[in-house]
Image (spheres, rainbow, N blue to C red):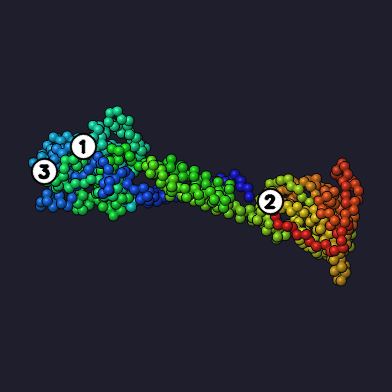
Amino acid sequence: MKRTLSQYLAMALLAAALMALLLLLSKGGLLTSWALDRLWSLNGPFGATVGDGTVLNPQVVIAGIDNQTLRTLRGDRPRLSREIHARLVTTLTAMGARHIGFDITFDQPGDPAEDQALREAARQSGRVVTNCYLKNDEVFSRIWIEGRSFFRGEAFSEGFVDMPLDGDHFIRRTRLYAPKGELPTRVSLALAMYLADIGRTPQDVEYHRSYLVLPRLAGLSPITLPLDHTGLSLIGFLGKPGSIPTYSVADILAGKVPNEAFRDKCVLVGGTAEEFRDSFHTPFSPKGDMPGVEIHAHVLQNLFTNRLPREWSGPTWWALLLALAVGTAVFSGWRKPERALLWVIPAALAVLPLVLWLFVSSGLFLNMFDLWAALGLGWICATTLDTLFLRREKNTIARLFHRYVSPNLLNQLLEHPEAIALGGARRNAVVLFADVRGFTRICEELQPEEVITFLNTYFNAVTQIIFDHGGVLDKYIGDGLMAFFGVPIATGKESEQAVRAALAIRQALVKLRAEGQAVGDFPIREIGIGINGGEVVVGNVGSEVHQEYTLLGDTVNVAARLESLARSGEILVTGWVKDNLPPGVFRVDSRGPMQVKGRRGEVEAFEVVGLATAAPVAPEPAPPAT
């Protein structure tokens, strides 16, 4: 059935509303974390690795404070002394480290002599980057700043080490900068290390809401780093825990690590021992065993190689999903949901390889579950509303036609509602008028109650005949009736059906008279029938309060005039009807031209005498709709 603009609009609005609700309930994305993890599992590390799983040609290495370091260097202290850190700075500087970043919490004042030793080591090195936190705790921030103030003045720069956790307590993204607040920093530890390595400061970065522009060494174009709608960037994980080369601080200070391990490398110093409780869940460490310092190292390596995954999210992504859901709904409504499914399923199957290809080739992450949800919701909305619209239309058809057509024809109409032109259309049809002769005399001779009884008996028989021959009962007109054939469902045998119905009506009247003689009399003795065919206008006609499905036009008028010209017991048809009858089936005699009221010219009329053979008239049922 042809859909209206309002129905398409309803499908679009429902799809958009449900998609928006889904995005709202899922906080901007459906199973986003799970989708990203699946892509990581399919893609693997975000960079080349060697046989043991470590990064190929890393520019970042880790000096880890592991269990061995704590066991051999801590002594009876709760933490390593700052003198150990001072020695580490001096040693790493001597081994050729480009910069040294501390992911260590110096939150408590230490021994003044040891503090001085660390401060002096940092000053002489000139390559130290220290850390801070963006914790929204005024007391903690004050203690933190005071606790490391001895060291901060000698550091080249500083960066925050906060890592945003997803709802499942996994780390998948990093915050590279934060707006200025009480703390004097705007960049993360990894970004501070990157800027220090090229001799720049956070003031040299262009900060935008959806991206950052980072400077590079002289002669190289700036780097544009995209951010998602929350200001975060995806981390390009380079592998499992240990993929960044990690060396024990104890081994470094004992001279067991060759200089080549740190020469021309950026070194991150952090805790890797279990007691630090500084390990996290990531897509490559689902058991929560990747140290925080290694996560910073992954980000720093991404910055050096200018490779950070990008994530399409936020308003533009949501707009795309809404458009996809709306487009799918409208397309499904236009193509019919069952046919549209032949397009929607291949589109859904193509989502995963497309998303994977984009992630592998360009590092662009698209949430395939969002795309699947948009396609599915669009199709479901179209299917649901299409079913509701179809049910409503069928109810309308059943309510409109159940009194006018046979159950068989009504079922055909319900299966093919598109055949009905409620708003008006031009169709070819055959129209039949039948009228009781001598009805005025009958009304004079009988009581009104008796007239009604006999008339109802007659109409019951005639109506059933109309239905049996695939016709539509249009209306009762006093003692007459109007019926038509070929509308709303054309059969190609409309003329034959109408003529057979007329003969059956005449024969039924004979039977009614015979039955009436057994109980007295049946007063309706003769009828006149007129039949014409041709183009008509079909549709609902009436007021807003009451409408009827009927035919209009000259074809209808001529049929009515022929009925009035027919003598008692006669069936008059026009040449149009005669020419469309099967040859040799009926006996048709010419009545010559007849003047029809309301027309200038004459109408060639023919009388249907009966069948060409003496066989009784049998109903010609309507064939199945084509």
Q: CA distance from mark 1 to mark 3?
A: 24 Å
Tag 2 secondary structure? helix
Q: Quadrant of residue 480?
A: bottom right
Pick whichever of labels 1 and 3 is earlier in the sequence: 3
* Residue at the spot of label 3: 83
Q: State if disc 2 and disc 1 touch (CB < 8 Å).
A: no
The residue shown at (33%, 39%) is 307
* Side of 54 where 359 appears, left or right: right
**Residue 583 appears anywhere in the view:** yes
Please name the residue shown 54% across and 50% down the image: 342
Which numbered disc, 2 or 3, marks the residue that appears first in the sequence?
3
Above-or-below relation of 176 to 402: above
Q: Is residue 177 visible?
A: no
The residue beneath circle 1 is 264
Direction bottom: furthest residue: 518
Tell me the mark number nearer the camera, choosing from 1 and 3. Answer: 1
Quarter of the image holding residue 357? Answer: top left
The picture places residue 383, in percent across and down from the top left corner, at 55, 52
Q: Which label is found at residue 419? A: 2
- x%, y% of residue 499? 82, 56
> Along the line of sight, which residue is nearer the eye, 254 or 450?
254
**What's the CA distance linking mark 1 and mark 2?**
81 Å
